[in-house]
Amino acid sequence: MNGFSTSLPEDVQYKALTQIPGFENAKMFRPGYAIEYDYFPPTQLSLTLETKLISNLFFAGQINGTTGYEEAASQGFIAGINAHQKVNDKHELIMKRSESYIGVLIDDLVTKGTEEPYRMFTSRAEHRLLLRQDNADIRLTPIAHELGLVGDDRLAIVNQKVKDSDEIVAFTKKQGIEMSEANALLEELGTSALTQNVKLFSVLSRPQVNISDLRKVSEPFEKVLNQFDKETVEQAEIKIKYESYFEKEQEIVAKMQKMEDKAINPDFDYNTLVSLSKEAREKLLKIKPRTLGQASRISGVSPSDISVLMVHISK
């Protein structure tokens, strides 16, 4: 039963069950159960999911403190890729927090650890505006192609989708619409009428107006959209609706990327930096972050500690 704890002793479960209105005379044929398992603190892993102490040993799934099928499968996928890459002397795969939920999950585990079974909630991702289901193929197919997991034909399809959706967006910024064409529709949709002729992009930016509405009153727009499939048109509409939000998010990612690009030697002795707080030194020596960005996400490492590290790295 949803919301009813099944980790209680059988007699307690039954007594609790009969306290629910309507279940006073319920019979319990089989008690619920809870699963307990041991795990290795995932801070002992690198971002490739290879253990720091034993070379060539990769961990994935519940052993890292996670719960859930998707969480286990995604870790197994990354660990498997990196095991393959390592034995074949190829570059490792580390997913960024800004490009996939797998990247968020692994970075959280390795950098912060976990005190209870970890689930991958969307709220854990700070860039979830960019991590959408509609652009998963755009984000991840190039990475899969580089690894040899997808062929040239599939990459070509994704690249064409990007090109075509950008073409639709560009058309809306170039093509105008007259007041006489749009105002009746805008009034019907409950949004303010135009006081002058504007570009299609401007009208589509309104939350009340969809591409399917606007194509009915703009013949040039209808002709352009008829060249593309539904998925491409949908991608273009999302780009138009949220363009300013995406741009702001990309700026934040770019700023963070500067920190992610500043590599730290994993064998660096933080005890030599006396300006660091004692807690920061202990945490940094334990986690051994690969980048300044990862170091900044470690619990107990303050902004002032990051400033000290940044000065040292710059030198």
Image: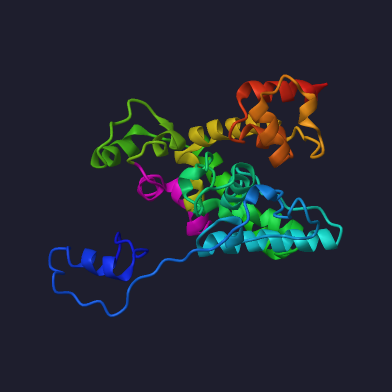
Report the label total: 0
Q: Left of 72 or right of it: where is 182?
A: left
User: Where residue 51 appears, x then y in whole percent?
Assistant: 73, 54
Quadrant in the picture for residue 25? bottom left
Instruction: Please tell me whether residue 216 belongs to the stretch shown in magenta.
Output: yes
* 189 relative to 26, above or below: above
Foreground pick, 227 / 258: 258
What residue sits 54% from the left and 34% below the top? Answer: 249
User: Where residue 312 appears, x then y in whole percent?
Assistant: 78, 23
Q: Left of 217 or right of it: where is 239?
A: right
User: Where residue 180 appears, x then y in whole percent?
Assistant: 32, 35
Instruction: Please tell me whether residue 307 belongs to the stretch shown in magenta.
Output: no
Q: Left of 206 or right of it: where is 278?
A: right
- Viewer can see residue 57: yes
Q: Quadrant of the N terminus?
A: bottom left
**Scheme of image coloration:** rainbow
What residue sits 18% from the left and 74% below the top? Answer: 26
User: Where residue 225 appears, x then y in whole percent?
Assistant: 48, 52
Quadrant in the picture for residue 265? top right
Quadrant in the picture for residue 142? bottom right
Q: Residue furthest right?
A: 89
* 190 relative to 15, above or below: above
Q: Quadrant of the C terminus?
A: top right
Q: Left of 117 or right of it: where is 277?
A: right
* 44 relative to 186, above or below: below
Magenta range is 209-232
